[in-house]
Image: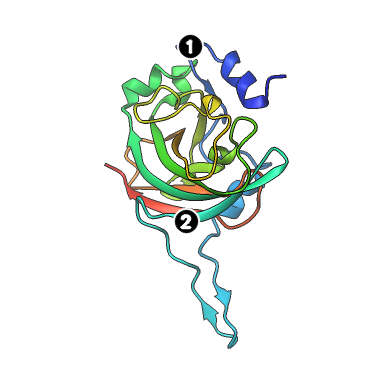
Amino acid sequence: MLRKKTALRLAAPVAVLALALTACGGGDDDKKSEDTKKSGTPTSDSAGSEAEAPSALKPGQSATGKSKEGDAMVTYDIAAQKVDLGTEAETEKLVSDPKKAKGLVAAVAHVKYTHKAGAPLADVPDVGDGAEIYADGTRGGLLIGASESAPGCEDELELEGWKKGQSHVLCQTYLVPAGAKELEVHWTPEDSEDEPVIWKFAAK
C-alpha cells in the first residue's frame, strides 16, 4: 500500500507542482505553526528567575532530535545546512496557478540527518517532514514534490533501510515572499507541539 507522501508525489504532474498551502502562514487549523512562532518564550530556572530560551543555531550546527519511524523511535543528529532561493520567474513555473506565486520565490532548505540510534528504517523516513521554512517570522507555503530534483537533495522514497551511522540530506521547498530579510529553518517531529529547533539564515 502506498504511503501518503508517495501518493501525493505520484498525484503531482511532473512539470507542475501542487501548492499544499494556499497562502503563506498556513491556516487557523494549523496549531503547530502558531506554536513555533513562540520559540523565544522565557523559561524559569531553579532560582525562580526567567532565563531566555536557547538562541537559534547557525547554519550547519547540529542538534539531536527524535522521530517516530513506523513503530520505532529513531534518534537523529540534525543540521540545517543552507536555504537556496529561486527567482519569481522560476517559481511561476513550479506551480499550477502562477497567480498564487505572485511576489513569492521558492526556498529550498537542505537539512542533513544522521541516524544515531534506533532500528534501521523499515519504510520511507518521516524525519524530513518536520522541517519548515519561515521568512521574517511567518511560515511559507509548502510545495509538494519540488525538492527531490533540486541539486544536492536526496529522494526520501529511496532511503528505506536507513541505519545507524548513515547520513542523508533531505530537503523541503516552501514559497516565501520575495525580498524577505531573514530565513529560518524550524524542525520538530511531525505533529508535535514541542518547541522547534531553529536555524537562522540571511536571505541573499
| Side (left or right) of 115 relative to 192 | left
Depth order, front residue of 184/168: 168
Other-residue count near label 1 (Cα within 10 Å), few / some / many at <14 / 14–19 / ≥20: few
Q: Position of residue 138 (x, y in %)?
A: 48, 46
Depth order, front residue of 90/195: 195
Label placed on residue 14: 1
Q: Are marks 2 and 1 in contact (CB under 8 Å)?
A: no
Q: Earlier in the sequence, mark 2 or mark 1?
A: 1
Depth order, front residue of 49/128: 128
Depth order, front residue of 47/148: 148
Q: Position of residue 74 (x, y in %)?
A: 61, 47
Other-residue count near label 2 (Cα within 10 Å), few / some / many at <14 / 14–19 / ≥20: some
| SS for callout 2 | strand
Q: Is residue 84 above or below residue 189?
A: above
Q: Quadrant of residue 178?
A: top left
Q: Position of residue 111 (x, y in %)?
A: 43, 42
Q: Quadrant of residue 30?
A: top right
Q: Position of residue 126 (x, y in %)?
A: 60, 37
Residue type at the position of mark 2: Ala
Image quadrant in which the C terminus is located: top left
| Side (left or right) of 131 relative to 192 | left
Front tag of 2 and 1: 2
Q: Which residue is mark 2?
A: 63
Q: Residue at x 39, y 19 (%)?
A: 92
Image quadrant in which the N terminus is located: top right
